[in-house]
Image (cartoon, rainbow, N blue to C red):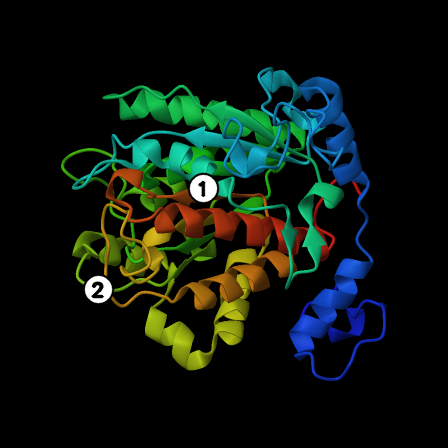
Amino acid sequence: MHFHPRRPDQTPDGPQLHDDYGPEAAYAVRAEAGLPTTKWEEEVARGLELGLPGADSIVDKRIPTFSRGELPHFAGINTFLKAPYVEDVRRCGEYDVAVLGAPFDGGTTYRSGTRFGPQGIRKISALYGPYSFELGVDLRESITIGDLGDVFTIPGNIEKTFDQITKAVSHVYASGAFPVVLGGDHSIGYPTVRGVAPHLNGGNLGIIHFDRHVDTQETDLDERMHTTPWFHATDIPNVPPKNLVQIGIGGWQAPRPGVKVGRERGTTIMTVTDCVEMGIEEAAQRALDVAWDGADAVWLSFDVDCLDAAFVPGTGWPEPGGFLPREVLKFIQIIADARPLAGIEVVECSPPSDNAEITSLIATRVICDTLGCLVRSGHLPRRS
């Protein structure tokens, strides 16, 4: 059992520690003592079998000749967190979590490059291991993750691309795997939601949307673009606009037609100032209350540009005044701890504009923290 700060009654038992630890660190160190190492041992054995035992001069006999697994972080073929590549997507339901890329930026209205988002996120994810110190979670020991590769998107045809993404997300969701979608520009928010909504047996789907931009206008430059996903998503009969909550909206890039649509449809907006002044915990609870009101499931859509531009240079519409990373991560953790999510997409990560891969890194961290909190609160694996 893992501790998290909103459920102090679930403090893990563990070894006695001296009193100079910080409270969170003490919980984390105790939690680590109770984590298994079974899957790590299996990975080591698999590496030795498939990658050959290491050279005679290698003292650590767990090291194979060919890299097969987490280590070294700079080696190997990039999948998300070095998860197994699932070439036969018909088998995605054998995994608790299925990662899929949506490499598309045909909905971009200014600075392109997000078609390389899935590549960038996968690349920097190799920096991470599966264990989070503060969360007291080891994803390798808790859940199975498979990387399905990328949806075959159609450059220059946004509607055919939408159909491809909808079919892909629908397939993953129906399989029972938890979908993690690597964008791609934010136009994919509409087809991803469209892929989930039919599988709720008529129940409603809520949306928690992190962004600096409302993305609720009907068209932009005469087409459905990355500024329009939530107009069309909330046109789906079981995706009511009252269950759309938008977090972090603000700045000089929120087109008035989208604001008008949100006002008329009764969506909920919280600015960065709203969230900081009311406190992240209270803001997160309000977001949960709105998104889950009468809904059977909630989709999490995270646009990296909700963070201050200093932390996400690799995005199409960077805007000063956004969240700090620690604020966003706390927000995400509260949401994922609260209830099982339908899935998550992370969008608008543009490696060609990124400095030192820090935008791809925050995208990776948001996904990892979401999965970690779903695990520690018992929402993953779903089969349990």
**Compared to 190, does 150 lie above or below?**
above
In x, y percent, where is residue 258? 24, 53
- Camera sees residue 322: yes
Q: Mark 2 or mark 1: which comes first in sequence?
A: 1
- How crowded is the residue under tag 2: few (<14 C-alpha within 10 Å), some, or many (20+)? some
Looking at the picture, tell me which residue is in the foreground, 173 or 116: 116
Front-lying residue, 249 or 81: 81
Mark 1: few, some, or many residues within 10 Å (few <14, many ≥20)? many
Q: Is residue 236 visible?
A: no
Where's residue 47, x and y in %?
Answer: 70, 26
Mark number displayed over residue 251: 2
Please tell me whether mark 1 sits on a helix, a strand or a loop. helix
Residue 250 is marked as none
Type of the residue with mark 1: Ile
Contact, CB < 8 Å: mark 2 with mark 1?
no
Q: Is residue 173 left or right of residue 237?
A: right
Residue where numbered disc 1 is placed = 124
Residue 336 location, quadrant: bottom right
- Farthest residue in the front direction? 57
Kindly give the residue lying farthest to the left in the view shown. 221
Where is the C terminus found, in terms of image quarters? top right
